[in-house]
Amino acid sequence: MHFKTAERGFSMMEVLITLLLISISVLGMVAMQAQSISFAQDSVQRNTAAMLAEDLMEIMRADSIRVLDINGLPREDSDYYKASGAAFYSAPDTCAPLPDAAADRLACWAARAEEALPDASALSESEFHVCRSASPNTCSAGGSAIEVQLAWRVKEGDCLDAGVDANAEGYDGTICRYRLRAEL
């Protein structure tokens, strides 16, 4: 009588398939890690932009006589306003304590924003604005809200701006923007 013994161990094919599956899993985890780092960086920059925009709103709220008219609506003209395409005033020698003049306060704020956001100094003239606004991303003389927009530069595709049309003319996927609209 001939007894067959049970085979023990793994075949070479089983080992290779297992190694293939483990390799694919590890590559997937590495790709997810890289994406999570990108998302975390975007969150940090958006949080910084939100804090800066809120700071400027609070500066204007504290100096409302230079921002609001007698009816409580934003003035048509204020030294706190800055149009896209216009340069900020030069910052004074010292920003602590905050200067008395509105233009100097805005310049101190702009200097902080340029330091805190990546490549913001190159974008401050073209992409930053502070203005009266009747609707989002529109500066208008009749608006009852104040809009603050900041911008910073990222790698292509790393900006998570919601509602931005990537097919729009003039779209630059390396520029992220943050807008805050509020009524003082």
Image: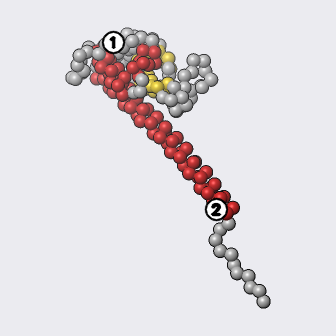
The amino acid type found where label 2 is placed reads: Val
Q: Could you say which is closer to the camera, residue 6 or residue 46? A: 6
Residue 180 quadrant? top left
Coordinates of residue 25 in the picture (x, y in percent): 59, 52
Looking at the image, the residue that sits furthest to the bottom is 1
Residue drawn at (51%, 41%), measured in percent from left and top? 34
Q: Secondary structure at mark 2?
A: helix
- Check disc 1 and report the residue beneath it: 89
Q: Position of residue 26 (x, y in %)?
A: 56, 51
- Residue with the most extreme right position: 1
- Residue at image position (41%, 27%) is 118
Q: Is residue 93 left or right of residue 5?
A: left
All told, the count of numbered labels is 2
Which residue is drawn at the image coordinates 61% and 51% (left, top)? 24
Res. 15 mark? 2
Camera-side residue of 116 and 85: 116
- In this view, 52 is above or below 89: below
The answer to whether one can see residue 42 in this image is yes
Q: Which mark is residue 123?
A: none
Q: Mark 1 Cα within 10 Å, few/some/many (few <14, many 20+)?
A: some
User: Sequence order check: which comes first, mark 1 or mark 2?
Assistant: 2
Quarter where residue 8 is shown: bottom right
Q: Residue at x 24, y 21 (%)?
A: 95
Q: Secondary structure at mark 1?
A: loop
Q: For the residue marked with disc 1, what is the amino acid?
A: Tyr
Residue 142 in view, yes or no: no
Identify the image quadrant of the C terminus: top left
| Left or right: residue 127 compared with residue 1 | left
Classify 10 Å Cα crowding around label 2: few (below 14), some (14-19), many (20 and above): few
Q: CA distance from mark 1 to mark 2?
A: 68 Å
